[in-house]
Amino acid sequence: MIARHSIRSLAGGGRLLAGLVLAAAVLAAGGGSVFAQTIVVPRPKPDPMYLNEVRSEYQLFVIGDSMAGGLSDGLDRLAQDDSRFVLNVRTKDATGFTRPDIYDWPQAIEGILARNEVHIAVVMLGMNDSQDMRIDGKTVSFGSKEWLAAYNEALEAFVTTLMENNVAVYWLGMPAMLNHDNDKAMELVTELQRKRVSEAGIKFIDTRAAFAGPDGGFAESGYGHNGIYGRLRARDGIHFVDRGNDKLADLVLDELRRAVEAADQTVAVRSGNEVEVTELPAFGQEAGDGDALEIEPSIPAYGSQISELPDAAAGERAGGLVPFALETVMSEEEVRARKGDFGPVEAQLQILRRSAARGSVADALFSRGALPAPKPGRADDFAWSGE
């Protein structure tokens, strides 16, 4: 069950585009001096341990503008059955790094982290940043050298606060926009953000590639996370409809679950806040090299971890119970008390349910009978595109 806490406001935001040509020139030629003014805080823990600590439950905060608000709705729908993530939402529409007079995000993030325990932050912020900035009472044009310096300063303050609090951050870039000038502005904003967060060791998720059309630009429709073709973007050429937000959320959840499984490092048994770690991955996790974990049937000795499955014949010989296998997930007393409760099939299902990594495809299959969604083009993809 996902807990959800939101802070929202009305959508909007300006898109002044003056200075794009100058910005491109600064980035290409003199941009180095602008970037050199910032200080990057390196991530203290290298991959694969991206999360700061292994937990049975992670406080997940979605932070940003109205694009982040749509993303949080998608996460709420797609992660309903994943109890590892408690969803919290801190979004404010029509805000960004260019208008601290309306909402000061570097200051706001300090307050969010001071008042809450934040394990994971998913940030999508920048849709409203294609506008001029006021600096010391003076207006500086979007994309100018002064604008770039001020934007990087605000961005660095925001990133540094997250890093100093040891938060696992997932930063989403902006997707392609329908309006040509706005699209070019978002490319600049995304590139500035990508450079800053990548140097800080933050995970950057490229949404442009995921939603682009054949020409690499804006695409109104496409394949959703479930392989069904349909509209992904809203009529304004900026936001996503529900199907698009679900696909966006799926991109984030893929990264989150991969990080959790790496942090769990082959969790075999979860009990409250305690985690037992084994040398082998739990069923439903990857073996570490991208290949699926193969489990050969055999009867493990009492007390061993659950990395093997017994065969049905052994269950029949044991009078409808696979005693040693069940003893790896149940106490010896519980096994003796329930000897008549399990047939060979149910016994193996009990093992699979208890040994599957929480939130994995195996967990969904054996616990709820939920089949994994087919990926577009895969052999089990029978979705009709309507074409």
Image (tube, rainbow, N blue to C red):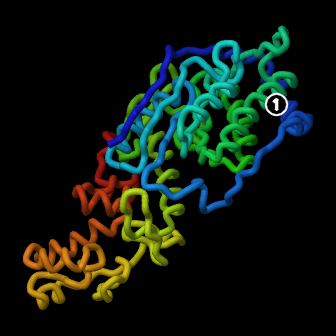
Relative placement, left or right, of 152 versus 341 is right
Q: Is residue 141 above or below residue 244?
A: above
Name the quarter where the C terminus is drawn.
Answer: top left
Q: Is residue 228 above or below residue 329?
A: above
Given the current orientation, which residue lies at the most extreme bottom position? 317
- Identify the residue at horizontal 88%, vertical 35% (top origin): 37
- Label 1, on which residue? 24
- Please state the horizontal and vertical placement of residue 5, each as a whole percent of the image: 43, 30
Asked which quadrant contains residue 356, the reply is: bottom left
- Identify the residue at horizontal 61%, vertical 28% (top origin): 111
Q: Residues within 10 Å of mark 1 (few under 14, many from 20)?
A: some
Q: Amino acid at mark 1?
A: Ala
Asked which quadrant contains residue 364, the reply is: bottom left
Relative placement, left or right, of 153 versus 6 is right
- Please state the horizontal and vertical placement of residue 262, each as a whole percent of the image: 53, 63
Q: Is residue 151 above or below residue 270?
A: above
Q: Is residue 367 above or below residue 138?
A: below
Is residue 116 at least partly visible in the picture? yes
- Identify the residue at horizontal 30%, vertical 86% (top origin): 302
Name the quarter where the N terminus is drawn.
Answer: top left
